[in-house]
Structure formats: C-alpha cells, structure tokens
Image: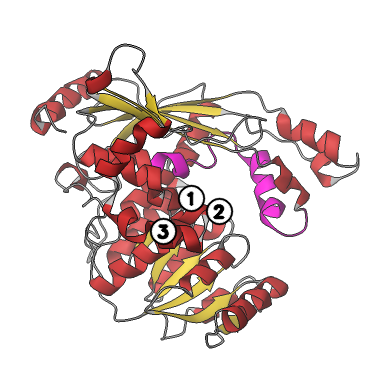
Amino acid sequence: MHDMPRRDFLAAAGAAGIAATGLATQSTPRRKAGAKSVANLAVKLDRVRAAFIGVGARGSGHVSQMCLIDGVDIVAICDNHLPTLERSINNVVNRHKRPAPAAYGRGDDDYKRMLERKDIDIVIIATPWEIHAPMAIAAMEAGKHAFVEVPVATTIDHMWKLVDTSERTQKICMMMENVCYGREELLVLNMARHGVFGDLLHGEASYIHDLRGQMFEVEHGTGSWRTYAYAQHNGNLYPTHGLGPVAQYMDVNRGDAFDYMVSISSPSMMRTNYAKDKFPPDHKWNKTKFICGDINTSIIKTKLGRTIMLQWDEQLPRPYTRHNFLQGTKGAWAGFPDRMSHETHASGPDEWKEGKDLEPWFEKYEHPLFKRMGEESKKNGGHGGMDFMMLWRIVYCLRNGIPVDQDVYDAVAWSAPFPLSETSVANRGRTMDFPDFTRGEWKTRKPLDNMSNA
C-alpha cells in the first residue's frame, strides 16, 4: 500500500466482509501446546548438509545444482527407482568430483531410514504430490528442515499438519516455488516494492502448459503418476507457479491474506481424445475415465479487497503462459510477452511499452538478487536459471541466519487452491474460504524484505 493508509483499507475490507453471507467457512484451530509461530524463523548453519528424496526429473537437477554451491555437502540420496538413484550418485561423484553420498533405495519407505542420520540438516523432497506432506512432516519430526517441491500438499488436512509440525519442531518447511526467482518476477516484485504501480488492485496468474506428452511416461517418470491425477480430481491441480509471485507482490500473509475463492472448470475432453489418438484401444489410458476439466478458472478475493484471476490448463494446444499480470492505480505489468503501461505514458500510440522500450525500466528496477546472481544462474541453468537462483538463495539464507523467502504459511496458502477449487467446482462454483494458516498474524507481519539482503 502506497497511497491509502493500510488501516483505512483494512476497515473498508472488513465492512465488505460483514455484508457477505453464505460463505463456506474454514475454522482456525488453536496452536498446539508448546508450539509457536515460525514467521521469520531464521537458522544459522556453517555448512548445509543436504539429503534428497526423489531424484527423477526435478530432483536430479536439484542435486546437480547444489553440487555447484559453496558450503553444501551432499550427504545422502534416496529414490525407490534404483537406476535413477545410481545415476544421480554417479553424477555427484564423476561429474562434480564430490564424495559419494550414501544411497537409500530399499523401497518406498527407505527415506525413513535415511532420516535417522544425524549428519543431515536439510532434506529436499521431489516426489509425487500426494506424498510431499507426509515426507516433509517426517523430515521435520526427525529434526531436519524440509524443502519441498510444488504443491506442498493436496489436502487442507495435510496443510494444517505441515503448519503444526513446523511450529512444534521449529523447523523450516519451505515450498520451493522456483518461479519467484525468475528475472521478470523479481523485477516486478522490486517495482511493486518501490510503488511503481501505486496501490495494487488486481493480479492474474496461471499455469498454461500442454503436458499431454507426459502420458507416454507410462511405467516410470512424471507421467506415470501425474496422469492419474486428471482422473481423480477436477479443479486447479497446479496453482503455485503463477500464484506465488503475485502473492508476493501483494504481500499475502504479510499485510494481506487470501480470503475466499470461487472456481469453475470446462468439460474434460483432451486427455480422453489424446489417449484415443496416441495409444492402442486396450491401453490403460483408454480404460481411464478422465474427469478434470481441460481449463479451470478461479477468482480469489483478498482480505484487503484485491482480486486475483487464477487459471490452470495442462492439456489444451495453446502457448505456454503464467500470465504474471499485476494492475495498480498507477500502471500495470503483463507477462508473456512482457508489456507495461504506466501513468507516465497513459495515452496515445505508446500506451503500452514492450521490447526495447522496457529496457529503461529493467535498468532502473533490476532486482538486486538478479544483479548479483543473474549471470551465474543462467549459466548453471534450471528453467533459465531460476532453479539455481532459488537453491543459491536458500543456502545463502541458511548460512547467514536469514529467514527464507517462502515460509510454511506461504507454502500452504499458495497450494490451498488445489483442494478448495476441487470442492468449489463440485458445488457449482460455491464460495470457499481460505483457512487462516497464520492464525491472524498476517495483519501484523511486515512485508517480505524484497530478497535484497544478499
């Protein structure tokens, strides 16, 4: 907030909330006895001793990139697919010339044996969605900090258990939303922090990515488990890539919070059609009833009255986009492709700036983190460098005693549209309240420090 005092905005939003009726409420359980908030939890480690659960498509990249970061020891790796496990260990030893990490691959639960080790500080979890939460909870219970792929959980019950466990054990639980570390997203965050867009009113976020090709990963790989999700759920199954950055722009959980949402889905056609076109009639995908709408659209209202349009589509033939749209009283940013409108050029043929015309804005508002690590991140890769940037930043925060940029409250809030959208869709777009995972602390927490303390 830059023009209207925040207390006035809060009062106006509260008055609007009193007038609303018929909402599907979410109760807020009391904090467990002996537990305390983990807002701004900071941990100081001289070296970061890391272990990994799941080293397939995402996890293998995390292992390789962590090998490139100073102050990190690769202690142990666990995967129930032995060829994948062996490949990742060989990569650590042969490519990166590091000591061989201990291997754990005796089955689905061997990660529990790994967690008994005393020489592990953090556990990076990159496994199928439904087991993210149980593994993160087990890691924290074992005295480790948990860093989890997206979404952090798929049920509200698991989300509360993550919060409760983090608060009771005082261990970090961070969902690794890598898109928050993209150059454009860091730029827009920095511009929002400097008041370039004025008071923020509206955002748009999405994950539009045709992933039907994953259906060919039948016995192993992402498609071997992710394809079943489209037959089990109907809603927004992957909300965080677009939503995380917009939530940070709007100070969600740090001065504002998600209040409620509504969600609707289109018919489900594309997975069935794709299976019919690409696989034999007796293939299991042609015996699977896909129910998830091909595109899901949700609208989120925040406590301060802002709105967010959130979309998801992993099967329609259309260009990739995360939208990344932010509208304020003084201007707007739109991604894919990058464009900007501002009060300084709000009329005439140059209303929108794009391409080279955006260079002065990049020069003035390039994020400090990207200035420091942008070139190295691009060189080391991972979605254009954002993966390496994220991991480098995590290690930097841990070794310097700084709170990580995304805490457990962010993890669950950004993931909550998965189950909330599913319930809303099943009930003709019924309004669903977001749980207040911060237990009211969003009202008094300070905004994220802009990741500028590097």
Which residue lies at the image location 37% right of the left edge and 79% below the top edge?
A: 71
Question: Which residue is pictured at 72% across the width and 74% down the height?
Answer: 83
Q: Relative to residue 108, is residue 427 depicted above or below?
A: above
Residue 167 lies in the magenta stretch: no
Q: Which residue is mark 1?
A: 151
Check the image and name the residue furthest to the front.
Answer: 356
Identify which residue, 97 or 17, lies in the foreground: 97
Residue ID for mark 2: 129
Contact between marks 2 and 1 (CB within 8 A): the answer is yes
Query: Residue 334 location in percent, x, y?
Result: 40, 29
Determine whether the residue tagged by mark 3 lies in a helix, strand or loop: helix
Q: Residue at x 91, y 43 (%)?
A: 282
Is residue 231 on the magenta stretch?
A: yes
Magenta region: which residues?
Answer: 218-244
Indicate which disc, 3 or 1, sits on the residue closer to the N terminus: 1
Disc 3/disc 1 C-alpha distance (Å): 28 Å
